Image (cartoon, rainbow, N blue to C red):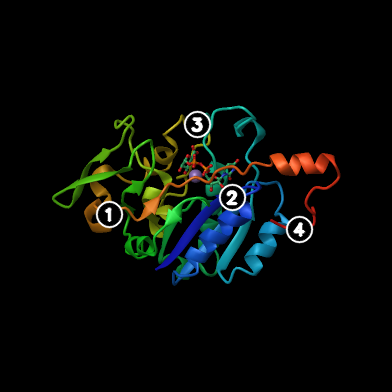
Amino acid sequence: PTIYVITPTYTRLVQKAELTRLSQTLLHVRQLHWILVEDSPHKTVLVSEFLVHSGLTYTHLNVPTPRESKLQEGDPSWLKPRGAEQRNEGLRWLRETAGGQQGAQLEEGVVYFADDDNTYSLQLFEEMRGTQTVSVWPVGLVGGMRYEGPVVEQGRVVRFHTGWRPSRPFPLDMAGFAVSLRLVLANPDAHFDGNAPMGFLESSFLQGLVTMEELEPKADMCTKVLVWHTRTEKPKMKREDALQKQGLGSDPGMEV
Ligand code: UGA
Ligand code: MN
């Protein structure tokens, strides 16, 4: 099966660095198709050029997050979900493409939602490739914990190890599951709810698709951490701003 990786991304200082790191991980994975979805009303030159030279098989999409759903300056980061519209656009493309000529070829697939800033072990992709319905595994450095993840007993997921609201239908991070393309196509209405309350974005998608009992535990029965919810520090631009005021700022034509 082909792994379809759906990644939301948005313009900021560290974007090219994040995309470089992620793409160079993905280059090591066979049979992978990257669906990169910009949170933007148009496809940017930076991302377009980046993809052309990436060496990956990819689809470049874009959709802006509606203004009322977007975090405003000063809002706490947990107020509104991020990347929901972009993941839905990736799902829309998969369903549309599967309905077209290449449809039959597409059905053998696995869908994974990979944020642009996390850290992914190559082993993770081989674990998820065998996904029949929905597979799950632990995620490191997330939710204010060393790791969060499913708890497996006798080969079945029986509950979730999480620091917060374990009663959520699926208290999993976005990086902690993959879905078979067949299941995505069989449930044409399954999508991420951009208005879901904090912590319920993953559940809004998974709820209609599976039950906890049906989850397929990977990564040695969920005993190994193969993906980390790393976050990149926002670079300080104090010197840049100061120099710019003197007309000595960095060359704006230099892509960073
Ligand atoms: C956590 C989860 O790991 C995310 O999967 C979830 O979407 C997010 O919370 C949430 O609350 O919605 P976190 O590290 O806080 O992740 O979120 P980011 O990494 O900042 O954003 C997730 C993805 O959305 C990234 O790929 C990012 O590039 C993208 N994004 C972020 C946008 O497309 N637009 C934005 O305005 C912000
Ligand atoms: Mn993140």
Distance from disc 4 to disc 1, alpha carbons, whole Å, reads: 41 Å
The answer to which of marks 3 and 1 sits earlier in the sequence is 3
The answer to which of marks 4 and 1 sits earlier in the sequence is 1
Is there a contact, CB below 8 Å, between mark 2 and mark 3? no
Look at mark 3 in the image and give the residue it sits on. Answer: 78
The answer to which of marks 1 and 2 sits earlier in the sequence is 2
- Tag of residue 224: 1
Is there a contact, CB below 8 Å, between mark 1 and mark 2? no
- Judge by depth and name the residue closer to the eye, 27 or 113: 27
Q: What is the secondary structure assignment of the residue under circle 4? A: loop
| Residue 36 appears in view | no
Distance from disc 3 to disc 1, alpha carbons, whole Å, reads: 27 Å
The answer to which of marks 4 and 3 sits earlier in the sequence is 3
In the image, residue 24 above or below residue 18:
below
The answer to which of marks 4 and 2 sits earlier in the sequence is 2
- Disc 4 marks a residue whose amino acid type is Met
Q: Is the CB atom of the residue marked by disc 2 within 8 angstroms of ligand 1's nearest atom?
A: yes
| Residue 93 appears in view | yes
Is there a contact, CB below 8 Å, between mark 3 and mark 1? no
Q: Is the CB atom of the residue marked by disc 3 within 8 angstroms of ligand 1's nearest atom?
A: yes
Q: Quadrant of the N terminus?
A: bottom left
Q: Is the CB atom of the residue marked by disc 4 within 8 angstroms of ligand 1's nearest atom?
A: no
